[in-house]
Amino acid sequence: MSAEEKSRSRLLRWLQNLVVIMVMALLVMKFLEVGIFNDRWGWQAAEREVVQKRFNENAMLARTEWLRQGKPPQITLQTQREDFQVRMNRQGWPGIDNGCLRLWQMLAGGRLHPRVELQSQQCWFWVATIDAEETLRLVYDARTGQLK
């Protein structure tokens, strides 16, 4: 093999290695785009589930306290950070007359900041997700005490 053929062979191997590295880099980039940034693993669903569970558990705690105290019109709900005065409805659930945003702060913990609207005696919460194009829609029905 002459020096020219050896040089050409090295150049060809170098180009092949470069192409393989570029293809691998493109595949890794595509994996990251699809896997992490596109919520393929359900982070949004998990966050929704956690918020719903926290809200509903705190609503149940308020109801339990309401029953324990003999069904007063207002109870005190204690959290790690502060105490909340919660007006209860006749069914024994936190009433929407507390204000939808205030209910969210008391029962969901206030970490997420939703857009809030009162519609037909229900509090509607729209929570922005990591992906700015999507929002979670949650509805609190004071008749059942459930956030769905």
Image (spheres, helix red, strand yellow):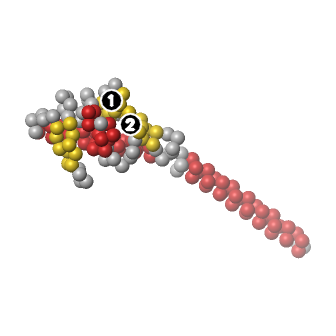
- Disc assigned to residue 122: 1
C-alpha separation, residue under disc 1 versus residue under disc 2 = 10 Å
Q: How many marks?
A: 2
Q: Secondary structure at mark 2?
A: strand
Left or right of 144 on screen, residue 71: left
Residue 115 at least partly seen = yes
What label sits on residue 40 in the rendered view?
A: none
Q: On the image, numbered disc 2 is attached to which residue? A: 116
The numbered mark, 1 or 2, whose residue comes first in the sequence reads: 2
Residue at the left extreme of this rendering:
70
Q: Amino acid at mark 1?
A: Gln
Task: Say whether residue 55 is visible.
Answer: no
Q: Name the residue nearer the viewer: 9 or 119.
A: 119
Residue 23 drawn at (x, y percent): 69, 55
Depicted 78 relative to depicted 147: above or below? below
Query: Above or below — where is 125 with respect to 113?
Result: above
**Percent position of residue 37, x then y:** 53, 49
Q: Residue at x 66, y 54 (%)?
A: 26
| Image position of 125 (left or right of 56) | right
Quarter holding the N terminus is bottom right
Crowding at label 2, few (<14), some or many (≥20) Cα neighbours within 10 Å?
some
